[in-house]
Image (cartoon, rainbow, N blue to C red):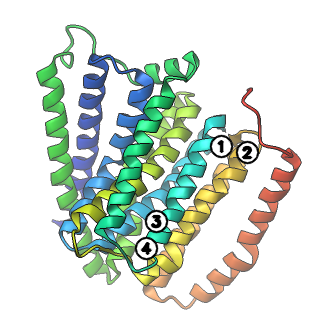
Amino acid sequence: MTILLFIGGLVGLIIGAELLVRGASKLALSFGISPLVVGLTIVAFGTSAPEMAVSVGAVLDGRTDIAIGNVVGSNILNVLFILGVSALITPLVVNIQLIRQEVPIMIGASLLLLALGLDGKLSFLDGGILFGLMIAYTVFLIVQSRKETKAAHDEYAAEVKPAVPGGWDSKLPVQLLLIVVGLAFLVIGSEWLVNASVTFAKALGVSDLVIGLTIVAAGTSMPEVATSITAALKGERDIAVGNVVGSCTFNILGCLGLSGIVSGDLGVAMSAAILNFDIWVMIAVALACLPVFMTGREIARWEGGVFVLYYAAYIIYLIMASQQHDALGMFSTAMMSFVLPLTMITLVVMLLKRGKLPDSTP
């Protein structure tokens, strides 16, 4: 029954996000908002909607470890697993705007989360700061989109198509209904997913935090998985990367911002475990994007393979740590003393060979 509840919740989140994005996109386009703006804002928000629904729902249920673990785990999965698998399908082109603007913003949001959480919780004020920055970031993207090239506009227009006149989704009542039904699916799906996850945690003898970092994070990241891998298969490699980076920023600013606001005076507790390890992994993953993206302005297949292997290592570490496995010490030593330093040296050498930040020309 718990497995069915989890699957039902996951399906509800995916359907809800799809309906919400479709309804909001068509509504925005009907009012003359450009496809580029829709892609940068509504679609990016839509793929992060499951994370937001689950994190807010978990906070309201008093399961703050699931709320924090969901976002941190999703961001780690987004970069290491989703970009890794997408790059294995085809080398991913990295737009110069991602290197100069979006990735630094993602890194800044990650560092801000750490700074706000050093006192052991995200307060109502902390949540307000994060959510306010998300609104400012969204407005900034809309203003900036007016200066984008026609090529960028057309690329998003191919992804976000306006409602066809006379089509079933061209009428305002239908678009509003899609938004309402999508939100309902998100709320119900998040409730089922959180309840099932808590039951899993108790049955497996692991913490809410580990469940949030793994099972819940993977489940709520399904829209990002589908969007990026589909974009990679269709050759729209720029969107595959932009979707992941944008979603990571929205996860921190939007999901945890709103979670902090709804927590009221209690705040969202941040455990020592996540402050001492997992949030640092998230920051390291965000920082790793810069040298990888800057070397040739693409994510090569071998780099994608390294990303996937690192995600597997991270999951193995979490499982070993939760079970206090005898091999945990040896595994940690091998990662910290050999694998990580070797990877960093390789990235630095590649970056030095590159010599400078790439210009905006292809």
| 67 vs 310, nearest the viewer | 67
Vertical order, 61 against 53 (above or below): below
Q: CA distance from mark 4 to mark 3?
A: 6 Å
Q: CA distance from mark 1 to mark 4?
A: 27 Å
Give the numbered dot on residue 113: 3
Q: Identify the element where label 2 is drawn.
A: helix
Q: Neighbour class for label 4 at 10 Å: few (<14), some, many (≥20)?
A: many
- Which residue position holds label 1? 99
- Which residue position holds label 2? 294
Cβ–Cβ under 8 Å for marks 1 and 2: yes
Amino acid bearing label 1: Ile
- Which residue position holds label 4? 117
Between disc 1 and disc 2, whose residue precedes?
1
Between disc 3 and disc 1, whose residue precedes?
1
Amino acid bearing label 3: Leu
Q: Identify the element where label 3 is drawn.
A: helix
